[in-house]
Image (cartoon, rainbow, N blue to C red):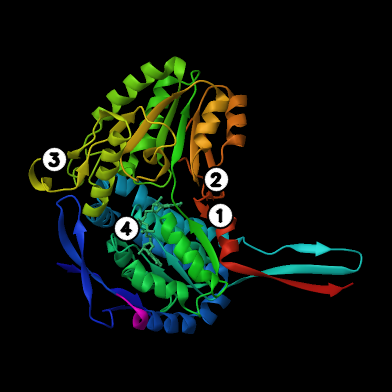
Amino acid sequence: MQKILNFIGGEMREPVSGRYFETDDPSVGAPYALVPDSGAEDLELAVTAAKKAFPAWRDMPAAERAKALHKLADLIDRNKDAFARAECIDNGRPVAGCAAVNIARGSANLRFFADEAVTFTGEKFKTDKIESYTLPQPLGVVATISPWNLPMLLFTWKFAPALAAGNCVIAKPSEVTPMTACMLAGLANEAGIPAGVLNVLHGKGANIGAEMTAHPDIPAISFTGGTATGKTIYASAAQQLKKVSLELGGKNPTIVFDDADLNKAVEGAITAGFSNQGQICLCGSRLLVQEAIYEDFKKAFVARAKEIKIGDPLLAETQHGPMVSKTHMEKVLGYIDLAQKEGGKILTGGRRYIVDGRCKDGWFIAPTIIEGLPMTCRTNQEEIFGPVVTIMPFKTEEEAVALANNVEYGLAASVWTQDRVKADRVAAHIESGIVWQNCWNMRDLHTPFGGVKKSGVGREGGRRALEFFTEEKTVSRCI
Ligand code: NAD
């Protein structure tokens, strides 16, 4: 069994308690590594190291901090194959997707925020009597907590802007997928990141995660994960009026109008529905198709879903790997059962999928499409977070928008039509933080990222992330 370690004050450390728990390789359905079950004592060590490192890191020119983050990005790229393989084993995403998305975005996030911070400055104001300027100043020791679905991408997305802005960080990756965060920590010294600036603690949300959100010397928490956890963290942070950024769940619509380019829309809906086995917060799990093209679209969509290559995620040609864990597979299968009890008809998939050979005990579910459910049923209201898409027809633009908005979530939507004016009208009326027109998950890292309703609080991305990790001080003088 491989052993994962915490990274505190520039050193790999065992948890103070000496306790570990197992983490699984979902493609073979068996444990393969031990994860520190960190607690309050580990956090205390990390906070002490981070507080000690803070003044020098804060006072370093942003360009110097950027150099270290660029070096870390270079080291990730140099080891990208090892990172992609480790992420694949830990998470189940096929290795090609891990390399092209999870790991590539890991280094890209570091580079992006390193450069953004160099040009991140305050504002100037002037009246006839007063001139003022603002100083955006880092907060001190901040915490980032990330989920399992895109481990390296989201781990770096959270801590990179914090470090770039001059904070020291205590970062907690998901206990379900801790491996690449541990590998990255192992490169921090070589990158020239001073001891204590980046600390990585592993463990369970209810233990180390809760300790982090309650710690009096941590003034800000940047969290990505489920809505229920987000509520717990929000409540805990409120006790000490901490800043929080909450990026939470989604139940995103894909809306296809009858004037859409059918082939592109089918391909887009497939990518939106089934990328990363449907385990992306942005996945389009509710597919709304205008009635004139409904039958043709459905036929093409189901046929295309059946072509997705399921198998051993370590093979380059595999497109669809296992669910991240047994618990998660059982949750998704439970929703597929529920969908049938609610009157849904399975058009393809709908059960555990057995892969021959090495992965025979893996936790696979084939891409699943369900028809015939009302928007108000639980299957269409709750986040399933698996390869499950419901499909339903709509008549008018107004009906499509009403159906799209008829959920508690509001993270993302994609709209497929060749009518630009209609696409803009729908975008304006959809209740979500992000709307894609004739594409899905095309990301410019400068743009604000976040959700409305139960999908989150605040915006990340570009300048917004740097604003979150700083406080603006206003300095004024009479003229
Ligand atoms: P989760 O909420 O179970 O866990 C996320 C992280 O929070 C983990 O590191 C976990 O250990 C930690 N945690 C759990 N309980 C905690 C507590 N009480 N205090 C502090 N930390 C705690 O989420 P998950 O199952 O890992 O991830 C899937 C969810 O994440 C889905 O709902 C998905 O939509 C969401 N997500 C959202 C975005 C976004 O940007 N909006 C991106 C990716 C994933």
Residue 344, position as x, y percentages in the image:
31, 30
Instruction: Give, as a three-letter code, the residue at label 4.
Output: Arg
Residue on which the image places disc 4 = 78
Residue 307, position as x, y percentages in the image:
24, 28
Instruction: Give, as a three-letter code, the residue at label 1.
Output: Arg
Q: Mark 4 or mark 1, which has the lower sequence index?
A: 4
What is the CA distance from the residue labelled 4 to the residue labelled 3? 35 Å
Give the quadrant of residue 74: bottom left
> Mark 1 vs ligand 1: CB under 8 Å?
no
Q: Mark 2 or mark 1, which has the lower sequence index?
A: 2
Instruction: Give, as a three-letter code, the residue at label 2.
Output: Gly
Residue on which the image places disc 3 = 354
Quadrant assignment for the N terminus: bottom left
Q: In front: 271, or 301?
A: 301
Kindly indicate whether the residue at mark 3 contacts the one at mark 4 (C-beta within 8 angstroms). Answer: no
Query: Tag 4, which secondary structure?
Result: helix
Kindly indicate whether the residue at mark 1 contacts the one at mark 2 (C-beta within 8 angstroms). Answer: yes
Residue 306, position as x, y percentages in the image:
24, 28
Residue on which the image places disc 1 = 459
Query: Tag 2, which secondary structure?
Result: loop
